[in-house]
Amino acid sequence: MRSKTILSIACVLLLSGGMALGEDEAAPAEPTVTAAQPAASIMDSKSYLLSPEPLFADTEILWPGFLTGMKASYKFQEKFVDPVGNPIYFESPFIDTNLELIYLWHDFPRGSQLGGGEANVLAVQARVALTDRLAFIATKSGYSWLKTGITPDADGWNDWAWGLKYLILADEANEFALTGGLRWEMRGGDDDIIMGGDGGSNELNPFISVAKGWDRFHMLGALNYRVPMDTSELNQVLQWDLHADYEIAPDALPGFFPLLEIHGLHYLSNGDALPLSVGGLDYSNFGSDDVAGDFVAWGDVGFRWELTPNASLGAGYGFPITDPDDDIFNQRVTIRLTLSY
């Protein structure tokens, strides 16, 4: 009896071992991710010149997305860099919080109706994420020094512009974002620099912007319709912008993104504020009386250098694509320092 019991136990153990061995051979165990071996992150391809450590944790403040913006729900936007050229109207589709310091030098062509000259602009932009999809934006402000061949040298305060933008669609897997917004440009600057006053630039500006990424290559685009409150006084304008960048050498030049941009501007109507056949581009709305149907295009070549997750330096050199003498774009230098939350 005792020997039968021992034999039964032995059979059970052999059968159990055989079943376990059969299961192991039929379905080999897949490697598991442990705390010591984290899964690959969507941020693996992003590098920074000074430090990859953010100053602020992505913890919830008051409600989801406040100040942190899209980072509360998405991470792919952290792979992108912001545009450089056309800083007032080329708005990225991403919802975030930042403060941006801008210097702009703009050279007027001597053969244009303005007779040469230049404009120097110092400005500040601010964006505040209200939720993970909604942000307040203030994109026009600052001070300008204006010199042309047909006006006295002058300096003064620029007009102001602010509004809201809303994230319509975000696709993490395909690195795609689509945003719509509405901006109000208020007459409040000095008319000596062709802003404010009788030649003011009260405008309502609906816009859309889009982003698409492919690993280290990224594209941004924007479309703006500038509608003056008095369409008989000022010009209606349609603007578009395209941006492409690529992080060329994350090991040798961490955080360095060379970029190329193209900007186009269509004057849709005449105004009656100034007797000119050139318009104000993105600087102002001159209300010129002989520009309807004109098209102006220019490009920017430059870079964005991601210093840390909270600081970025951008610079670009702008050059004309259409005949510079037909409007007021001869060349431009833009420098932007972005400090983000």
Image (spheres, helix red, strand yellow):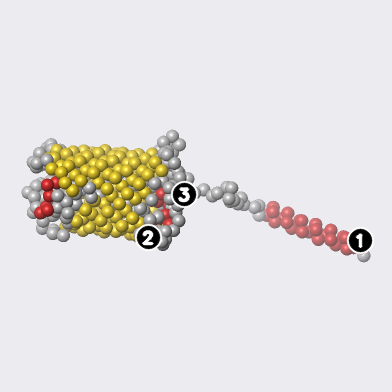
Q: How far apart are marks 3 and 2 (CA)?
A: 22 Å
**Is label 1 in a helix, a strand or a loop?**
helix
Above or below 218: residue 19: below
Residue behind mark 2: 131
Mark 1 vs mark 2, foreground winner is 2
Q: How far apart are marks 1 and 2 (CA)?
A: 75 Å
Above or below 120: residue 274: below
Please name the residue shown 29% across and 45% down the image. Answer: 101
**Is label 3 in a helix, a strand or a loop?**
loop
Please name the residue shown 22% across and 39% down the image. Answer: 105
Residue behind mark 3: 42
**Is label 2 in a helix, a strand or a loop?**
loop
**Amino acid carrying mark 2 in the image:** Thr
Q: Which of 244 and 65 is in front in this view?
A: 65
Residue behind mark 1: 3
Residue 114 percent across, percent down from the top left: 11, 41
Dividing the picture into quadrants, the one containing residue 171 is bottom left
**Amino acid carrying mark 3 in the image:** Ile
Q: How far apart are marks 3 and 1 (CA)?
A: 63 Å
Does residue 295 appear anywhere in the picture? no
- Of the image marks 3 and 2, the number of the one nearer the N terminus: 3
The reply, left or right, for residue 38 in relation to residue 151 is right
- Of the image marks 1 and 2, the number of the one nearer the N terminus: 1
- Of the image marks 3 and 1, the number of the one nearer the N terminus: 1
Mark 3 vs mark 2, foreground winner is 2
**Amino acid carrying mark 1 in the image:** Ser
